[in-house]
Structures are given as C-alpha cells and as structure tokens.
Image (cartoon, rainbow, N blue to C red):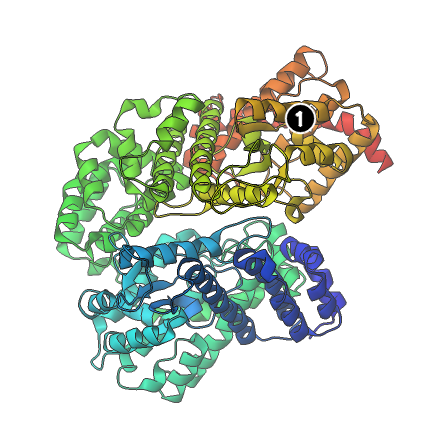
C-alpha cells in the first residue's frame, strides 16, 4: 500500500487524464488526500447535479468515479474485484438512470416496464475494465411496454433504445458516459436495436451460433424491467447450459482464439506492442479456457455457471474439472493482466489493450504501475504470458504441414501459382471463411457468391503491395459485415473494384474499417464521378439535406450520415488512387461544412415546431481550428462555437416558449447531438465545443454581444490566437456579417505584442510537454511541425496586423508576399499538410507507415520516393523550426 503523495506523483507524472481529473473534481481529490477512498467514491457519486440533466450528471459522475477508482487501485487500497465491480455497478446505474429519463420523457404517466437492458461481456460478469465500452442487448415485451396512441410498439422500443444510447454516448466538455455497441444482438444486420423478448427466445432456441452460447455465460439483466430479463434468461438457459457435450460450440470458441492469434499477428509476439487482451497467452485465453470447461461441464453442474472469470476458475478447480495449480496460475495471471490493462487505459482514458511500442510510452506505463521502467514491466508479465499461452495450446493442438488434405495441397499450389510468396496466410483465411463461423457467410448463397469471386479476389490480393496485410484487413472487414452476398456479387461483376479494394486494404486501415461497417460504400466508387471534387457547399448541403417524401427528422440524420460517409470514403479513395491530399483536405472541409448546414437547418426547423422562434434572434455557428481553416483530414473533429443574435432577455413565441438563453442552449445541444451521436449509419463527427467562452464551464451557446464582451475583457491570449482561424459556417448573411465584424474588431484591436508573443511561446512549450509526438513522423506535434508553423503564423498575424485569413495556407502566403516570413515556408506548409492528410488514412496513430505503403505516401506528397520524402520532410522541419526558434528565442529566455 502506498501513501497519497506517492500515488498523486504517479498520477501527475504519468496519467494526463487523471491529472486533469484531480483538478476537475476537488472534492474527490480532497477525500483521497485524507486517505478516505470510500469517501472519495461517495464524493464522485455526488459529482453530478440533478439540475445538470441526466446526461451531463452521468458524464460528470463518470469522470469523478474514474478518478476515485484509479486512485484506490494505484494506491493498492482496492483489489481488482472491487475496482471492476465498482465500474460495473456504475454502468448499471447509468443505464438505469438513462432509461428512466427516457421513459419519463416519453411516457410520464405510464408504468415504466416492459423494457430490459441485458449486460453481456465483462459488464455482464461485473468485470468491466477501466475504459471499456458496454455491449448490451435490448429486449421489450410488446404487451406491457408503454407507447403512445397510434405509435407502433416496435417503433416505440427502438426510439427508447436509441434515445437511451444517445444520452450515454454523447460527448461534450465533460467527456462521455459509455461507448455502446449493440451488435451482439441476434442478426444485427437485419434486426432493429430493440427486439421482442419472445422473438429473441426463438432465435436462441433455434438459430444461434456456438459463440453466442458462450457469450451468454456472462449475461444478466442490468437495467429496466429486471423481471422481464430474468424471464428471458430462464427461457434460454437450456441453450446456454446443455446437458450433453457440445463440442461444436467448444470448437467455435477455440476457433475464435485461433483466429484472434492469427489476425492480430503483430500483437502476438511478447514485447512492446503486445496485445494484452488478444495476444497469445493474454486475457482472452484465460477467459476462453474457463468458458470451454464451463460449456462442457456446466450443463450438469450448476455450480460452474458463474460469469465471473475468477469465480469460474475457482469453481472449476473445486469440482476437480481443472487442476488447482492451473486455476491458481490462471487466476494470478488474470489479475496481473487486467491490472496492467487498466494502467494502459488510465494514461489517457483510451480503450487500448496494447503495450506501447515506443520505449518512452512503455516506461510511462511501467512507472504509473510503480515499476522503474519498461524492462521491469516486461519481466513481470513475461512468465505469466508464456505459461498461459502454453496452457491454452492444450485445447487447440496445431496441425502441421503433413496434415494438409489433398484439397488444401491443391489450393496451396494454386495460391503459389498466382503469386502468393507465403500461401499459408491466404490458406488459413479461406479455410476460416469456409468454416461456417462467420456471420456474413452463414447462408449458402453468400458462400456461393464468395466462391465465385474467390479466383479474381485472390489474384488481385496477390498483386497487392502487402498481400498479408490486405488479407488480414479483408478478413476483419468480412467479419464485421452483417451480410456479404451483395458485396461479393458486386465485386464479381466489377473486376476494377476488386483491384481498388486490394489497394484500400493494403494501405488504408481507416477506409477498411469503414467498409467493415458499411460494405455498400464500395458501390459509390462504380461511377467515375465519385472521384470528382465535392461541389460547392450550398449545392452539397442541398444534396445532403434532401429528404424523400414521407421521411422525418430521424430519417434525415440517417441520410446525412450515409451521404457524408459516401463522400468521405470517396475522398479517401481519391488519395489512395493518387489524388492531391491538399485538394482532398479541402473536399473534407466542404463536406463537413455542408453537413453542418444541412443538419443545423433541419434541427432548427424541428425545434421551432415546439418552441417557435426568438424574435430578432437566430443561431450562428462559428468554426475554428482545422474546420475554420477549411482543410480537414479523414479523422478531424469539428471545433465549433455556438452563438446567437438578438436580445438574450426575450422569449420564444412557440406553444412551449423558452427564454432566449435557454432556447439557444437547448438548440445548440440538439445540433451538437445531430452532428455527433451515432445512428444506425454510425457516427458522423466528433464535435469539440471547448473553445467557447469560459470553456467547458461556460454556456454551450452565448449571445453575440456576450461573446464580443468576453473577447474584449476576459479572453485569454490562446483564445485570441484560436480566433485567427474562426469563421461562421451557419447563419443568415446578416448574422454572419455581424459575427465577422466581432472577429475583425477582436483580432485588429491594439495589444501588447511582446506579452502576446511571450504567452504564445509558453503555450507552445506547454503543448510540447503535455502532448509529446507519437514519433518523428507525427507531423503535427514534432518540433518544426504543423503546430510550430501555426504558432509562427498566428504570432506574425498579430505582429503585423494583417493576413487574418482562417485558411492557414492563404494567411501564410500573404505574410510571405509582404516579406514578413521566408518563402520556403510555403513549400514546408504544403508538404507537412499533405503528409498529415494522407497519414490519417494510412497510419492513423502517427507512426511510420508500412513499408509497402511508403511509395504511395511519397507520391501523395509530390516526392519521387520514400527517401526523398524523408529528406524533404527534414528540410521542411528545419525551415519551420528555425523560423519559430528565431521568433521564440527572446521570450524563452525571459520564461
């Protein structure tokens, strides 16, 4: 057990996420400092106020609980069971409160019953990890679920489930509550998100696959109508716990592990980059080892049915199903793996299970755990990982080459003939696809469509720059598809698309992931016009917002997500095909601006139906950052500030009138949700509103007059620097002009330049300290990279009182043409920006691209080869670095 000062030092030194939480939640921090960890949890549970509304209250509580739990864990005061159970209990509470809020909102006078949330996975077993998502199944009873007159009960259930998910997944300055994955429900490709309970029972009794049997070992009712959930669990008990041995289900479980080992090959070798969850000898193999034995023996012995992994291992040992020493070693390994998994996630609240590849980041995790360095952490884990892997191998003996069938030998020879240097990888993939365990390949027609496509597909993949990588990503994509038959038939009919698919799979994991969610994205590339630049924003906004007859606001959200997804995917494909990343970046910007225009206009119209209009007032949306500059990457979020014109003391004129401030703040939240909350077509954009006046503590929407006053009297230097890239992207011409006038007045106001420069230099130093680059190719954060260039441009804009154009390239060109900055910076800006845009597709973690992808990146940046690109990049960094150093030097000496 450690004292608070030591624990706090580890947090401050090694976990930026928790360090911020220490400052955000002083009452929790105060209890921790007093050594009262239970009191800290109590303070965390009280962190959200009812006045905040259920969503914000839960978000604040989630952040505070994350701090309290992590501190108790790091201090050694709570064991792993207490940690995971506390996190799981809060997930239950969050689901219950969100569901109750939705029911109260929709059916305030009805008894709230007939809808249950089943928890699966680690949530179901009350072993939730530190930054986990949750995987619920939503069921309802049509006979008892409240619904409005003339409202179909199935539609009511879907609306309840969707709204509950929105409350928990929506992000703002306080973060989010939980990520929710609803794809574990029966046949997610064809079923609504909430299912009638009897239909679900029928599915599990007749159609479900072996892996679904194992999934329900850890299922339980977590929120809502618990009696309904208990009824469902009783009815499917014979499906989960069969008295006869079900080796088909067992083979399915073991096959999952084999495929995980094979697919995540880069995370299998122990060392930096090892995947603690999926890697050989990792968390999954402890869990699967227990579940296989539970499936074999649990039908006859109810004592073996616990969903909790540690309890299951103890029960299996007590019943002499597995050796006590084996159970003890698995238990010890599981505790250690889960503890280190939590350390990985505590650093920045990311849902990661991989040991960092960089030595510095791995040292950081080790030191957060209380170890001296990465070597000590690896030494701690290694014997457990190796033993668990060897133990699990006993369930799945490997087949050697001599065991290949004649058909497999013939296929292997064919694969070598068409160009696969290593035929083992495609051989394993094809066997997996043909094995009947892939959801998208269940039906005979889908398997026939795959077989018809297979020759052409394999030839294209054999010619791919990185065949193994392309195959891995194709396998992952097929595994995510709800249905594959139309996808395979399309590719069979369009051989050119097969070649393009091979390129995408070889080079662009971001696009491959998108295809896994929506295979029909490839359809949009059939027409050559898909590779044209997006049209101007007004035309594009009209296309995005156009509704078919009879469609409603919810349909609009789905339609915009679909159309924006199509456009963004096509822009990414343009880059892979050799298009200019700078032009694609501008295209991404126009698509995002059109989405804002379409969704904001529709949300305003929907809002006005109930609340009317505020006389003389309207919403204005201000874009900042990359969105303000109009050049985005595939992964860019949207930095937005919501303002409103008119008198804040007026009231709207609808049947449910609201004061202007409340009106526009509710409207702003609706618009933010429309842009960010996932629907059936997935998420749209991450929206960051923290650049608004007073940041996360301020109102979501403020009047234009208040905004102007804040900029005159209270804004920090960094806020004025941020305004150099601000521009209105929604609002009437008059409202935009008024907003532009405030921006111009703020930016051109006389100021103490030396003080501004001093603050800018300090800010850049703080960024370098708290957000180190992921690698030398993290072109945004490296010294001499894009952040340095942005600071250089912004400080010179204020120094010379000119070039206040939100487009960074245009502002730089004006400063260069006026003789204020060296001309070489223009080429440096273009090269670095091109690399940023293309790297977000091919290397989203800002590390070095795969070797096969490097020529593509070089060509996209206008350089002949990878060596030439590195040389040009080094020259660009030197140019930027020297210019920034010259500006910053006098002020760094003062600091």
Residue 625 can be seen, yes or no: yes
The residue located at (49%, 35%) in the rendering is 839
* Residue reaching furthest to the right: 894
Residue 688 can be seen, yes or no: no
Q: Where is residue 444 in the image (x, y as percent from the top left)?
A: 13, 52
The residue located at (45%, 65%) in the rendering is 100
Horizontal side, residue 694 vs residue 565: left or right: right
- In the image, is residue 569 above or below residue 315? above
Q: In which quarter of the image is residue 245?
A: bottom left
- In the image, is residue 180 above or below residue 285? above
Q: How many marks?
A: 1
Q: Which quarter shows the C terminus?
A: top right
SS of the residue under disc 1:
helix
Q: Name the residue under label 1.
A: 743
- In the image, is residue 231 above or below residue 868? below
Horizontal side, residue 527 vs residue 67: left or right: left
220 or 16: nearer the viewer: 220
Question: Around disc 1, counting alpha carbons within 10 Å, would you say few (fewer than 14), some (14 to 19), or many (20 or more)?
Answer: many
Q: Where is residue 266 in the image (x, y as percent from the top left)?
A: 43, 51
- In the image, is residue 503 above or below residue 271? above
Q: Where is residue 86 in the image (x, y as percent from the top left)?
A: 54, 71
The residue located at (20%, 39%) in the rendering is 417
The residue located at (43%, 21%) in the rendering is 536
Horizontal side, residue 195 vs residue 269: left or right: left
Q: Which quarter shows the N terminus?
A: bottom right
360 or 548: nearer the viewer: 548
Q: Where is residue 606 in the image (x, y as percent from the top left)?
A: 42, 40
């Amino acid at each position: 057990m450690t004292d608070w000062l030591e624990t706090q030092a580890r947090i401050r030194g090694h976990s930026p996420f928790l360090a911020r939480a220490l400052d955000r939640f002083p009452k929790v921090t105060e209890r921790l400092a007093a050594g009262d960890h239970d009191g800290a949890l109590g303070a965390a549970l009280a962190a959200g106020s009812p006045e905040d509304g259920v969503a914000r209250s839960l978000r604040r509580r989630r952040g505070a609980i994350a701090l309290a739990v992590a501190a108790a864990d790091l201090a050694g005061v709570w064991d792993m069971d207490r940690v995971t159970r506390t996190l799981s209990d809060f997930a239950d509470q969050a689901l219950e409160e969100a569901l109750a809020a939705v029911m109260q909102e929709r059916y305030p006078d009805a008894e709230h019953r007939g809808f249950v949330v089943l928890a699966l996975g680690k949530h179901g077993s009350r072993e939730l990890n530190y930054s986990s998502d949750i995987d619920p199944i939503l069921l309802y009873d049509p006979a008892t679920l409240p619904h409005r007159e003339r409202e179909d009960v199935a539609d009511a259930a879907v609306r309840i489930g969707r709204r509950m998910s929105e409350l928990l997944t929506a992000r703002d300055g306080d973060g989010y509550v939980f990520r929710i994955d609803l794809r574990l429900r029966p046949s997610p490709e064809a079923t609504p998100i909430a299912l009638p309970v009897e239909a679900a029972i029928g599915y599990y009794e007749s159609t479900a696959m072996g892996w679904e049997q194992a999934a329900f070992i850890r299922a339980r009712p977590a929120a809502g109508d618990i009696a309904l959930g208990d009824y469902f669990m009783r009815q499917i008990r014979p499906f989960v716990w069969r008295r006869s041995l079900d080796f088909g289900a067992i083979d399915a479980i073991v096959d999952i592990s084999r495929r995980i080992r094979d697919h995540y090959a880069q995370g299998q070798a122990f060392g930096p980059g090892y995947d603690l969850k999926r890697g050989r000898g990792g968390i999954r193999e402890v869990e699967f080892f227990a579940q296989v034995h539970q499936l074999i023996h649990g039908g006859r012995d109810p004592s073996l049915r616990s969903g909790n992994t540690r309890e299951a291992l103890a029960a299996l040992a007590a019943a002499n199903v597995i050796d006590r020493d084996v159970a003890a070693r698995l238990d010890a390994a599981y505790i250690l793996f889960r503890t280190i998994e939590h350390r990985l996630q505590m650093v920045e609240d990311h849902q990661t299970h991989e040991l960092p590849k960089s030595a510095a980041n791995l040292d950081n995790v080790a030191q957060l755990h209380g170890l001296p360095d990465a070597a000590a952490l690896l030494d701690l884990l290694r014997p457990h990982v190796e033993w668990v892997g060897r133990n699990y191998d006993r369930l799945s003996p490997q087949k050697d080459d001599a065991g290949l069938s004649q058909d497999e030998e013939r296929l292997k020879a064919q694969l070598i003939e068409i160009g696969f240097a290593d035929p083992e990888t495609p051989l394993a993939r094809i066997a997996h696809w043909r094995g009947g365990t892939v959801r998208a390949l269940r039906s005979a027609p889908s398997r026939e469509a795959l077989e018809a496509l297979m020759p052409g597909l394999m030839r294209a993949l054999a010619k791919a720059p990185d065949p193994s990588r392309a195959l891995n990503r194709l396998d992952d994509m097929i595994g995510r598809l709800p249905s594959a038959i139309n996808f395979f038939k399309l590719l069979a009919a369009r051989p050119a698309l097969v070649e393009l698919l091979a390129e995408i799979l070889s080079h662009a994991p971001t696009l491959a992931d998108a295809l896994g969610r929506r295979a029909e994205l490839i359809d949009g590339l059939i027409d050559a016009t898909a590779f044209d630049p997006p049209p101007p924003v007004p035309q594009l906004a009209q296309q995005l917002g156009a509704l078919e007859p009879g469609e409603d606001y919810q349909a609009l959200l789905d339609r915009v997500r679909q159309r924006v997804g199509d456009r963004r995917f096509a822009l990414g494909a343009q880059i892979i095909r050799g298009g200019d990343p700078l032009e694609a970046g501008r295209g991404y910007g126009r698509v995002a601006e059109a989405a804002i225009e379409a969704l904001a206009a529709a949300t305003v119209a929907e809002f006005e139906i109930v609340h009317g209009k505020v006389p003389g007032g309207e919403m204005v949306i201000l874009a900042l950052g990359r969105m303000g500059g109009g050049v985005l990457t595939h992964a860019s979020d949207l930095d937005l500030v919501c303002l409103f014109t008119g008198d804040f003391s007026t009231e709207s004129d609808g049947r449910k009138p609201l004061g202007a401030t409340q009106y526009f703040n509710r409207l702003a939240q609706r618009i933010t949700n429309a842009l960010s909350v996932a629907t059936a077509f997935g998420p749209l954009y991450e929206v960051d509103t923290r650049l608004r006046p007073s940041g996360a503590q301020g109102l979501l929407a403020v009047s234009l007059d208040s905004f102007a006053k804040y900029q005159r009297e209270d804004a920090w230097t960094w806020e004025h620097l941020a305004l150099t890239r601000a521009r209105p992207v929604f609002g009437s011409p008059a409202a935009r002009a008024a907003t532009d006038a405030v921006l111009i007045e703020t930016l051109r106001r006389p100021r103490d330049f030396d003080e501004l420069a001093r603050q800018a230099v300090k800010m850049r130093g703080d960024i370098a300290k708290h957000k180190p680059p992921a690698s030398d190719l993290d072109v945004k954060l490296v010294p001499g990279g894009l952040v340095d260039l942005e600071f250089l441009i912004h400080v010179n804009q204020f120094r010379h009182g000119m070039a206040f154009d939100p487009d960074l390239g245009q502002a730089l060109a004006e400063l260069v043409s006026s003789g204020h900055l060296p001309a070489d910076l223009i080429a440096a800006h273009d090269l670095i920006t091109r690399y940023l845009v293309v790297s977000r597709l091919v290397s989203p973690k800002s590390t070095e691209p795969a070797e096969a992808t490097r020529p593509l990146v070089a060509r996209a940046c206008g350089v002949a080869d990878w060596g030439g690109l590195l040389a040009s990049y080094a020259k660009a960094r030197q140019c930027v670095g020297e210019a920034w150093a010259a500006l910053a030097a006098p002020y760094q000496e003062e600091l």
